[in-house]
């Protein structure tokens, strides 16, 4: 998003030496959350989602969404029941492995009790049928997310919470899965989602668009946008590009958006040279003429922008670079806990600095110096970048001081080792989840240096660093 030790669930079984055959663990209800320190009830314990098949229909005249979500998962514990995150709308039916299941709701938690307990390591399929008006999530600290109605449809996006507003899920980045997303809308409107377009068909005045996202994706990165859009599609370097621009967008803003979108292959080629191969099969972007959500978001493979992101050409290029950089850092390499969001935003912000340097618009050092020039009494220095607190995960300091941390690392270890750290971090953790501790260990391994002091100063101290590392000659 562009705005101003891994969590795991471990089941320990103890076998007594005197017992000739260990008993299978007793089945129990799955945890109602994954225990994220900032958002403890996000996600759910006891299972691993493998694939989501979303089949939704949206009627703009009523804002009603009807959906069937099918989740293929594997039980990681023996379960009498399990939870899904789902906020709002009316549930019509729930089945597990084709059999009706009992269910109950409490806030965002949907508890499903299958006819028979699920044994550990077994695969199971859950299907939820529902309908209603998907909600908009209002948060004065984190900004709004969910379903934003437009003059001709809807745009669904948000961070950290959005999936629960339109489909039942294990809604935390720790449980990534592949997706098939079928979106049906009135004929004449476009329905844009993640990944590559696998098919489109029209029947009885409704058009169904089928999108395939085979690479693992965190639930908050899943999106659907319905409305009238001008589409540009092409393939280049093995990547499927699709750009969608609302024809009602102001002509000057639309021209800037088209110009920045046209440079996407160039941006990706530049970043691939720094970060390694692009991790997905699809790319592109979407901008709606309304954009009341007020931020750009790195929805996987197809970021969403606001009109204000394209007030000028350089600004448009910069925000597109930021969101495309997230495809490596944030989407492919995802968070294990939200306190480490600088691993997303600091990296994407530093990509902007690198692009600026590449374009001759200002070096990374100049961008660093500008941020460092802020007075020591500024609120900019009053949070811990690697533990900013839940209300501050989108603070500007997380973005800019995250980028400053990377530049300080670059100065300390030299360009050769620094860019090797970035590239190998993206490649070794492709499709996975990471923490700050993992990044520090990785940087120390690649650089051959002990870096606790540097990271303590730049990530874990709520004060302006008194000294900046000297540039290493490489």
Image (tube, rainbow, N blue to C red):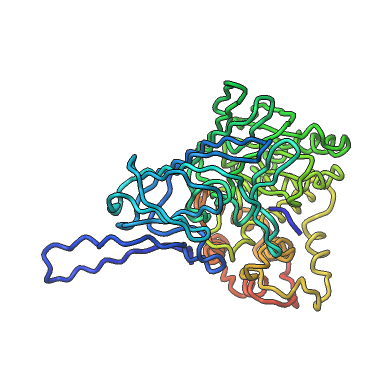
Q: Residue 157, relative to residue 283: is it above or below?
A: below
Residue 376 picture location, percent across and down:
80, 77
Residue 274 picture location, percent across and down:
65, 47
Q: How many marks?
A: 0
Q: Seen from this angle, which residue lies furthest right?
A: 252
Name the image quarter holding the C terminus.
bottom right
- Residue at image location 80% in from the left, 74% down from the top: 378
Residue 7 picture location, percent across and down:
47, 63
The residue nearer to you, when weighing 271 against 43, is: 43
- Residue at image location 73% in from the left, 66% down from the top: 397
The residue nearer to you, when weighing 416 against 357, is: 357
The residue nearer to you, when weighing 61 against 416, is: 61
* Residue 454 seen: yes
- Residue at image location 46% in from the left, 62% down from the top: 34
Quadrant of res 226: top right
- Residue at image location 35% in from the left, 53% down from the top: 113
Q: Is residue 253 toward the left or the right of residue 297 in the image?
A: right
* Residue 472 seen: no
Residue 164 picture location, percent across and down:
55, 52
Q: Is residue 461 toward the left or the right of residue 371 in the image?
A: left
Q: Is residue 327 toward the left or the right of residue 262 in the image?
A: left
């Amino acid at each position: 998003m562009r705005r101003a030790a891994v969590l795991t669930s471990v089941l320990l079984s103890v076998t007594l030496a005197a017992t000739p055959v260990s008993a299978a663990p007793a089945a129990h209800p799955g945890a109602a959350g994954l225990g994220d320190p900032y958002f403890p009830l996000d996600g759910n314990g006891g299972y691993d989602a493998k694939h989501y098949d979303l089949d939704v229909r949206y009627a703009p005249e009523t804002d009603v969404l009807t959906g069937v979500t099918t989740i293929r998962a594997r039980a990681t514990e023996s379960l009498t029941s399990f939870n899904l995150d789902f906020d709002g709308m009316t549930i019509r039916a729930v089945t597990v492995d084709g059999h009706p299941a009992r269910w109950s709701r409490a806030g965002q938690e949907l508890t499903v009790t299958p006819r028979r307990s699920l044994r550990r390591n077994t695969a199971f399929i859950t299907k939820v049928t529902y309908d209603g008006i998907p909600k908009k999530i209002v948060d004065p600290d984190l900004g709004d997310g969910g379903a934003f109605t437009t003059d001709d449809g809807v745009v669904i996006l948000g961070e950290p919470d959005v999936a629960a507003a339109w489909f039942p899920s294990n809604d935390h980045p720790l449980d990534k899965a592949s997706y098939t997303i079928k979106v049906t809308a009135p004929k004449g409107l476009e329905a844009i989602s993640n990944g590559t377009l696998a098919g489109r068909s029209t029947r009885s005045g409704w058009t169904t668009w089928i999108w395939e996202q085979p690479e693992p994706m965190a639930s908050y990165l899943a999106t659907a946008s319905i409305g009238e859009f001008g589409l540009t599609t092409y393939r280049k370097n093995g990547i499927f590009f699709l750009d969608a621009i609302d024809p009602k967008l102001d002509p000057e803003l639309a021209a800037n958006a088209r110009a920045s979108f046209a440079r996407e292959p160039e941006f990706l080629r530049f970043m691939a040279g720094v970060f390694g191969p692009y991790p997905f099969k699809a790319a592109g972007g979407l901008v709606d003429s309304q954009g009341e959500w007020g931020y750009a978001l790195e929805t996987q493979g197809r970021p969403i922008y606001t009109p204000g992101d394209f007030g000028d050409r350089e600004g448009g290029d910069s925000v597109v670079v930021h969101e495309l950089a997230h495809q490596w850092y944030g989407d492919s390499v995802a968070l294990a806990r939200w306190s480490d969001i600088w691993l997303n935003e600091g990296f994407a912000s530093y990509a902007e600095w690198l692009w600026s340097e590449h374009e001759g618009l200002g070096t990374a050092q100049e961008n660093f110096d500008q941020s460092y020039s802020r007075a020591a009494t500024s609120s900019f220095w009053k949070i811990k970048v690697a533990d900013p607190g839940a209300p501050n995960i989108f603070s500007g300091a997380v973005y800019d001081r995250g980028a400053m941390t990377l530049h300080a690392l670059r100065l300390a270890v030299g360009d050769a080792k620094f860019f090797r750290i970035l590239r190998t971090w993206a490649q070794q953790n492709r499709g996975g989840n990471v923490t700050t501790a993992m990044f520090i260990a990785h940087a120390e391994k690649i650089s051959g240096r002990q870096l606790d002091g540097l990271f303590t100063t730049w990530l874990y101290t709520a004060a302006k660093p008194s000294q900046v590392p000297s540039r290493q000659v490489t």
